[in-house]
Image (cartoon, grey):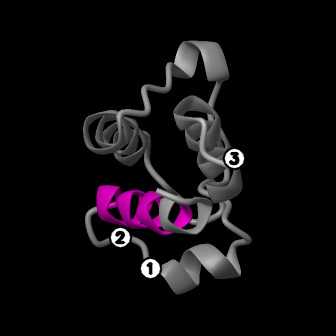
């Protein structure tokens, strides 16, 4: 998987984890900020679980803190999976 494919898949996971409560355009208008779009803590946990289960990218929120933007999430997943 290359970086562009990874970015698209992470975006899909972020949106799907919100269970219909978020669109790509809303996230884009908020400059990728999960806080600005009201992303819930439950959606965040679902997203972390899916990143681990679907991509093999385990992210420990106690070690990383809260990743608050799409760019931060993509960067962390890229680092974990060693995708450049």
Q: In the picture, residue 49 is in which quadrant? A: top left
CB atoms of marks 3 and 2 within 8 Å: no
What label sits on residue 72 in the rendered view?
3
Kindly indicate the quadrant of the structure image that contains residue 13.
bottom left
Q: Which residue is situated farthest in the right direction here?
A: 31
Dot 2, how many residues are within 10 Å of its Cα: few (below 14), some (14-19), or many (20+)?
some
| Tag in front: 1 or 3 | 3
Is 81 left or right of 43, judged from the image as shown? right
Q: State the residue in front, 46 or 57.
A: 57
At x 43%, y 33%, the residue is 57
Residue 69 drawn in magenta: no
Which residue does the image show at 56% across and 80% down from the upper left?
26
Whether pointer 1 and pointer 3 mark residues with C-beta atoms closer than 8 Å, the reply is no
Q: In which quarter of the image is residue 41?
A: top left
Q: How crowded is mark 1: few (under 14 residues within 10 Å), some or many (20 or more)?
A: some
Can you tell which of label 2 and label 1 is closer to the viewer?
1
Quick check: 10 above or below 52?
below
From the image, tell me which residue sits under label 1: 23
Q: Mark 2 points at which residue?
A: 21
The correct choice, above or below, for 11 with respect to 50 in the image is below
Where disc 3 sits, the SS reads helix
Magenta-tinted stretch:
7-18
């Amino acid at each position: 998987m290359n970086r562009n494919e990874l970015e698209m898949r992470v975006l899909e996971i972020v949106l799907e984890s919100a269970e219909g409560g978020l669109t790509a355009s809303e996230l884009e208008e908020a400059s990728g900020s999960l806080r600005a779009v009201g992303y819930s803590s439950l959606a965040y946990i679902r997203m972390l679980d899916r990143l681990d289960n679907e991509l093999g990218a385990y992210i420990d929120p106690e070690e990383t803190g809260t990743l608050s933007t799409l760019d931060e999430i993509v960067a962390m997943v890229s680092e974990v999976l060693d995708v450049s």
